[in-house]
Image: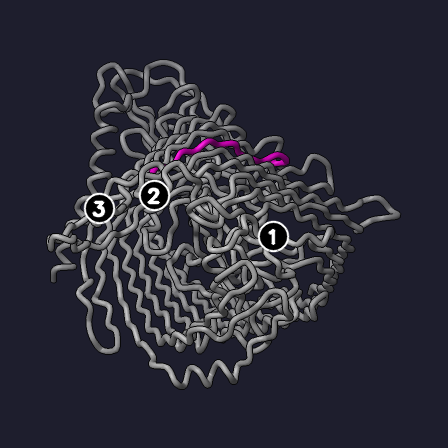
């Protein structure tokens, strides 16, 4: 009952945004009803076959007034200045219509029915635009949870689509993130994927805009990867979102024609990969559509021990009941067994100040062939979309994630001197993550007070449960780096585990949230966004070996978001700014004097300004922005007491360029500069935050020949640069930066494609910014058949 009360309060606060807009509209709009000396225009819009044309934009040339037709095709514009006016009727795919009318004061002018005719030129332009700059498609229903164009959105985001994934022969999800400015991809020692975005760590825990637990994922089911920059707590909450941004995996959906692809990829390190993507309608009227993607992946390692075996099946089914109601169901079934990678501990005990000085060859594994993790991931989702009327749509979505780590042997080399370290091992498993996320969104697109509004009102319920069995194996052996390093023996590890006492932990948390976001067209060129979220977090007691800890608590957070966009050149160039908030829940602390301090949620606030462009028929797209993310209420310890006045600042700029300057040439490029420092803390004030590089650059260029001799032959080239960063908070140990170059040759025919790809051409030995060794030179070949 208590949570229901919270929800009622949340919904009431969220709806206040709508009333603020109503007040704004009635106070400042020129289109107030009943203004003396002004008239009214009304009429009816229909299609060429005489049917009412709903959701058509009707405006007055040279004025900011306008309307949108209702479901009956009717429109009305009030308070129109007297005299000659030009009415403009526009709808994508139809020829625009302009009519001259004369408006008399205090009278209603009725315009005869207007018929819209399909515009072949417009349709051709849409088709052409869809076939150039194949890497530049950014339109998304997830970034703002509203149907906004990129140039209308005051937030920066990058979309890595399946065309780019295919061009680069990507088989590992983290490699998609190398195409995003300011992002360094990461793999944790057990294989989970994450990234550093604007100086903060983010996980891959958002799928189709829903929060799920994704420990392992395969690129076969990706339509695109969206990296949404900045703290995004207003629309995505706090449980799975970092302060620098979030990663949203958008999966492939069924469509109305039979089509498919099968591919085989082979390469260095015993890579062998088979994939299939089959789509088909299941009935004659194409209201039931089915698509399935599958992958079987097997790979060795560039090190002397290691493997990665993964099997994925992802079926999806859509059902269109009628023009108003449709359903979408999908599932992702993934089974992975992969070697774990060692993660260094206590390097500060050594004299090493750079990872390149560590006397262990990068090809030497500190694990063993069977020291691995076995993971099963099952993700399910269901969605319903219902068109209430031309102005309002209901979206209902449920996502369920279940990840089971059957076992994971993780290795922690604990350095004791420059030449010796203890190989400590922890055994996790079984470990079960279960998440349930339910969302109900209402999306409106309507005129209010003469202004166009795109309004989102929604509620979000999320629960997460973790069950963990953990065994601290302790020290397996002592390694001397001057001698050969033997592989770890699994039988010996299991024998040690059998003598140890297990620890069984269970945690559960829930969030209950409501949010609203309104995008208002104040003029044809000026758009503002007003958003807010109210979030109630409930942390249940942690249960360890059947005993409940006293660590349960509840906390409420409010997360605002504001933004503006001004289109300098309509539909081509816009300037934007935003103020965004992210938050993380903070548990109460019992102080040394016995008192309990209840803290506020940790908040990160960003302001950002920049320019976006989609010019020359989208042959040139890109953005330039400067941002500043500040944390002002981090917890810190002083004289054994915990205080909430710590601060941290991450600031920098980003540049992204996606171009198609001439036929066949496609370019993706980016550069980012970030500085993330500790401002106020118990220690290390003024230091850089650990494992956060400052400089990033990415480039990928492809050219496909069109001449008679080399027709359909193509070349690709690019790479990544990531600067040095510090491994530790004291800024004593450096992880060196790196430059990695890649290239490809491909032959692309309508029915098949062959690509030969070289990764890390210079065979650079390098580490991720978490200090994990990365693959050396690799050559792959991929053959795809299309039907």
Residue 155: horizontal and vertical position, in percent? 43, 38
**Can residue 246 be seen in the rendering of this structure?**
yes
Which of the numbered marks, if any, corresponds to residue 357? 1
Residue 227: horizontal and vertical position, in percent? 48, 48
Coloring scheme of the render? one colour
Q: Are marks 2 and 3 in contact (CB under 8 Å)?
A: no
> What residue do we see at 42% from left, 35% from top?
154
Report the side of 446 relative to 296 (left or right): left
Q: Earlier in the sequence, mark 2 or mark 3?
A: 3
Residue extent of the magenta highlight: 618-630
Q: Which SS does the magenta portion mostly show?
A: strand
* Callout 1: SS: helix
| Residue under numbered circle 3 | 639
Above or below, 649 relative to 240: above
Report the side of 257 relative to 324 (left or right): right
Determine the CA span between mark 2 and mark 3.
Answer: 12 Å
Determine the CA span between mark 1 and mark 2.
Answer: 27 Å
Magenta-drawn stretch contains 531: no
């Amino acid at each position: 009952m208590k949570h229901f009360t919270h929800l009622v309060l949340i919904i009431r606060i969220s709806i206040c945004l709508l009333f603020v807009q109503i007040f704004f509209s009635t106070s400042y709009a020129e289109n107030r009803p009943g203004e003396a000396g002004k008239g009214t225009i009304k009429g009816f819009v229909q299609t060429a076959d005489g049917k009412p044309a709903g959701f058509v934009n009707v405006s007055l040339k040279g004025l900011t007034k306008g309307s949108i037709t209702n479901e009956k095709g009717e429109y009305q514009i009030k308070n129109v200045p007297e005299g000659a006016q030009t009415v403009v009727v526009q709808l994508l795919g139809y020829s625009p219509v302009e009519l001259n009318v004369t408006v008399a004061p205090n009278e209603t002018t009725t315009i005869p029915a207007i018929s819209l005719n399909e515009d072949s030129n417009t349709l051709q332009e849409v088709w052409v635009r869809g076939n150039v700059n194949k890497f530049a498609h950014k339109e998304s229903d997830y970034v703002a949870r509203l149907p906004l164009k990129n140039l209308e959105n005051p937030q920066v985001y990058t979309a890595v689509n399946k065309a780019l994934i295919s061009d680069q022969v990507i088989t590992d999800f983290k490699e998609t993130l190398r195409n995003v400015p300011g992002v360094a991809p990461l793999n944790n020692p057990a294989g989970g994927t994450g990234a550093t975005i604007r100086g903060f760590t983010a996980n891959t825990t958002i799928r189709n805009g829903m929060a799920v637990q994704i420990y392992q994922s395969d690129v076969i089911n990706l339509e695109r990867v969206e990296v949404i920059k900045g703290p995004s707590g207003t629309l995505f909450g706090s449980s799975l979102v970092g302060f620098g941004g979030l990663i949203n995996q958008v999966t492939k959906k069924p469509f109305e024609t039979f089509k498919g692809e099968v591919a085989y990829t082979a390469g260095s390190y015993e890579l062998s990969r088979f994939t299939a993507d089959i789509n088909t309608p299941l009935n004659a009227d194409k209201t039931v559509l089915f698509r399935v993607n599958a992958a079987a992946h097997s790979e060795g390692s560039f090190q002397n021990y290691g493997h990665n075996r993964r099997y994925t099946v992802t079926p999806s089914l859509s059902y269109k009941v009628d023009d108003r109601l449709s359903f979408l169901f999908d599932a992702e079934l993934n089974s992975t067994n992969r070697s774990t990678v060692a993660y260094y501990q206590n390097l500060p005990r050594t004299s090493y100040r750079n990872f390149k000085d560590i006397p262990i060859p990068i090809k030497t594994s500190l694990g063993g062939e069977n020291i691995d993790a076995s993971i099963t991931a099952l993700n399910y989702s269901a969605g319903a979309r219902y068109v209430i009327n031309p102005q309002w749509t209901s979206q209902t979505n449920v996502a369920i994630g279940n990840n089971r780590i059957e076992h994971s042997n993780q290795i922690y080399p604990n350095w004791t001197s420059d030449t010796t370290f203890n190989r400590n091992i922890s055994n996790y498993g079984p470990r079960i993550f279960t998440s349930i996320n339910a969302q109900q969104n209402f999306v409106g697109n309507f005129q209010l007070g003469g202004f166009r509004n795109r309004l989102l009102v929604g509620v979000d319920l999320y629960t997460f449960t973790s069950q963990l069995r953990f065994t601290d194996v302790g020290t397996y052996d002592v390694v001397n780096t001057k001698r050969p390093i033997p592989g770890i023996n699994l039988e010996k590890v299991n024998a040690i585990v059998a003598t140890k006492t297990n620890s069984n932990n269970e945690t559960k948390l829930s969030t209950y949230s409501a949010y609203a976001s309104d995008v208002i067209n104040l003029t044809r060129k000026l758009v503002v966004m007003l958003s807010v979220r109210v979030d109630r977090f409930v942390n249940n007691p942690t249960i360890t070996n059947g005993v409940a800890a006293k660590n349960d608590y509840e906390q409420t957070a409010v997360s605002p978001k504001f933004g503006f966009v001004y289109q300098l050149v309509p539909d081509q160039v816009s300037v934007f700014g935003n103020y965004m908030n992210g938050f993380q829940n903070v548990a109460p602390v019992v102080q040394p004097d016995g008192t309990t301090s209840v803290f506020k949620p940790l908040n990160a606030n960003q302001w950002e300004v920049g320019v976006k462009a989609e010019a020359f028929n989208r042959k040139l797209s890109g953005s330039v922005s400067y941002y500043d993310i500040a944390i002002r209420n981090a917890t810190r310890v002083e004289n054994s007491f915990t205080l909430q006045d710590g601060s941290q600042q991450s600031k920098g700029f980003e540049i992204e360029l996606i171009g198609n300057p001439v036929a066949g040439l496609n370019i993706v490029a980016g550069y980012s500069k970030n500085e993330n420092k500790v401002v106020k803390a118990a220690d290390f004030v003024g230091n850089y935050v650990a494992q956060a590089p400052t400089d990033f650059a990415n480039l990928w260029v492809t050219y496909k020949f069109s001449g008679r001799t080399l027709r359909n032959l193509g070349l690709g080239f690019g790479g990544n640069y990531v600067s040095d960063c510090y491994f530790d908070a004291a800024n004593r140990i450096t992880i060196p930066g790196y430059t990695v170059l890649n290239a490809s040759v491909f032959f692309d025919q309508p029915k098949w494609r062959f690509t030969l790809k070289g990764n890390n051409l210079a065979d650079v030995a390098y580490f991720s910014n978490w200090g994990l060794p990365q693959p050396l030179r690799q050559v792959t070949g991929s053959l795809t058949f299309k039907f």
